[in-house]
Image (cartoon, rainbow, N blue to C red):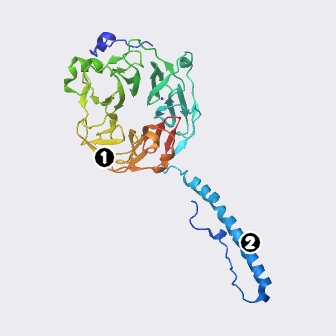
């Protein structure tokens, strides 16, 4: 179904259509426990029998004392072992959050004009606020969202200046013009195709919004009117062209598994089954489907700091595109994922990046992704790490399930 039919849209930008109404045990005995035993020699003289009796008693008592000392050693060993199994993260710290353990954290953003002021989103209508750079967080409530019986999943947040946007599921769009001190709700059309999964603040009163069915909308008047940037949904494009040779795309009726935007406005998205991916650049009327060039299904894709692509496959594989820009040419990079899926990659600079995944997997590269090392201290984190976000060179976060948030220390 074309969006132009369903939503009465047009791609004629001169005639914008109103679409929207206003997630040791010791192997050696320590020195303090060592006991020097003096074993008496046997005497052939009957006159030394009393002395021998005393020496034997002394030997028995010292032997008993040594035996008692040795039996206590596992206790000390277990204490030292427990301490060694609880190391601190080398460059990250776990932040305590005032939320239920079952919450999955989904996105984080800071106000550009106040770098210490930020917001954290998640499932179960989770909205937290910090004013100290992410060291401590407090819950925030939005009355217009709490008046209903829905338990919203806040998917994405973005700021430009003091202006910010939040989108969620079921369909909800929130807007602030005062750095998040107050949030207004903008009503949405019931004909919106798919669920809103991403939003990007692009300028004053302007934003770009994406749904999981591939609809892209832009606004320039604080969300009261939206214009379609693509002519149809991904399903309509693939079914109309009979997939054009894209494996697994025939009669596609699914949704995006993930979608990521580059700083210059390009998008890369992964199909819900991971059997192909799609790209879009500003000015293109449709999404462009691409066959995956790797054997395993795609988990996630995104943009490197140098403009190239990274690609994650199910089972823990990581690939990097050759060169920059949109391409179908990828090469695998060895990683120590222990068989767990890698779920996201975040670049701090062109050289340094971090990858996170299932069962506390945390990997680092300092050469642009050519080689990766595992931060073994993160192995004890009992959570899946879903997202890596670097706000700037000195501020980064890893978001996971069960309310797990890691803050970058550098």
Q: Is residue 89 left or right of residue 364?
A: right
Q: Give the CA separation, mark 1 to mark 2.
A: 64 Å
Which residue extends farthest left? 245
According to the picture, the residue beneath numbered tag 2 turns out to be 61
Q: Which SS class for mark 1?
A: strand
Residue 291 position by quadrant: top left
Query: For mark 1, does the 10 Å Cα neighbourhood hold few (<14), some (14 to 19), or many (20 or more) residues?
Result: few
Residue 262 visible within the image: no
* Residue ID at (77%, 88%): 46
* Residue ID at (46%, 23%): 168
Residue 187 visible within the image: yes
Query: For mark 2, does the 10 Å Cα neighbourhood hold few (<14), some (14 to 19), or many (20 or more) residues?
Result: few
According to the picture, the residue beneath numbered tag 1 turns out to be 333
Q: Is residue 101 above or below residue 207?
A: below
Query: In x, y percent, where is residue 326?
Result: 25, 35
Q: Is residue 85 left or right of residue 43?
A: left
- Of circles 1 and 2, which is in front? 2
Q: Is residue 42 above or below residue 260?
A: below
The N terminus sits in image quarter: top left
Q: Which SS class for mark 2?
A: helix
Query: In x, y percent, where is residue 188?
Result: 43, 14
Q: Nearer the viewer, residue 287 or 143?
A: 287
Residue 196 position by quadrant: top left
Q: Nearer the viewer, residue 275 or 75?
A: 75
């Amino acid at each position: 179904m074309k969006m132009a039919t369903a939503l009465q849209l047009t791609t004629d930008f001169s005639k914008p259509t109103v679409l929207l109404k206003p997630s040791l045990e010791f192997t050696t005995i320590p020195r303090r426990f060592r006991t020097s035993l003096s074993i008496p020699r046997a005497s052939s003289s009957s006159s030394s029998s009393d002395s021998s009796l005393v020496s034997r008693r002394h030997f028995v008592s010292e032997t008993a004392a040594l035996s008692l000392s040795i039996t206590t050693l596992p206790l000390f060993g277990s204490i030292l072992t427990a301490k060694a199994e609880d190391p601190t993260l080398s460059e990250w710290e776990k932040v305590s959050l005032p939320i239920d353990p079952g919450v999955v954290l989904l996105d984080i953003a800071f106000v550009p004009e106040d770098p210490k002021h930020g917001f954290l989103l998640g499932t179960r209508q989770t909205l937290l606020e910090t004013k100290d750079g992410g060291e401590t967080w407090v819950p925030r409530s939005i009355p217009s969202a709490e008046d209903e019986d829905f338990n919203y999943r806040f998917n994405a947040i973005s700021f430009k200046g003091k202006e910010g946007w939040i989108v969620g599921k079921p369909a909800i769009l929130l807007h602030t013009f005062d750095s998040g001190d107050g949030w207004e709700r903008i009503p949405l059309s019931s004909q919106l195709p798919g669920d809103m999964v991403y939003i990007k603040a692009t300028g004053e009163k302007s934003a770009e919004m994406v749904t999981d069915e591939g609809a892209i909308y832009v606004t320039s008047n604080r969300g009261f009117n939206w214009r379609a940037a693509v002519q149809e949904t991904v399903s309509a494009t693939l079914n109309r062209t009979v997939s054009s040779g894209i494996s697994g795309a025939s009669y596609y009726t699914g949704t995006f598994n993930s979608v990521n935007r580059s700083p210059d406005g390009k998008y890369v998205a992964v199909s819900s089954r991971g059997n192909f991916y799609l790209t879009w650049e500003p000015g293109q009327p449709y999404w462009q489907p691409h066959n995956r060039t790797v054997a395993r299904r795609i988990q996630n894709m995104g943009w490197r700091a140098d403009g190239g692509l990274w690609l994650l496959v199910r089972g823990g594989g990581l690939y990097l595109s050759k060169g920059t820009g949109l391409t179908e040419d990828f090469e695998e990079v060895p990683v120590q994922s222990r068989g767990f899926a890698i779920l996201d990659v975040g670049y701090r600079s062109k050289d340094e990046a971090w990858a996170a995944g299932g069962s506390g997997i945390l990997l680092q590269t300092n050469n642009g992704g050519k080689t990766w090392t595992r931060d073994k201290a993160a192995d004890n984190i009992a959570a899946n790490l879903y997202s890596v976000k670097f706000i700037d060179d000195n501020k980064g976060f890893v978001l996971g399930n069960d309310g797990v948030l890691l803050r970058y220390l550098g």
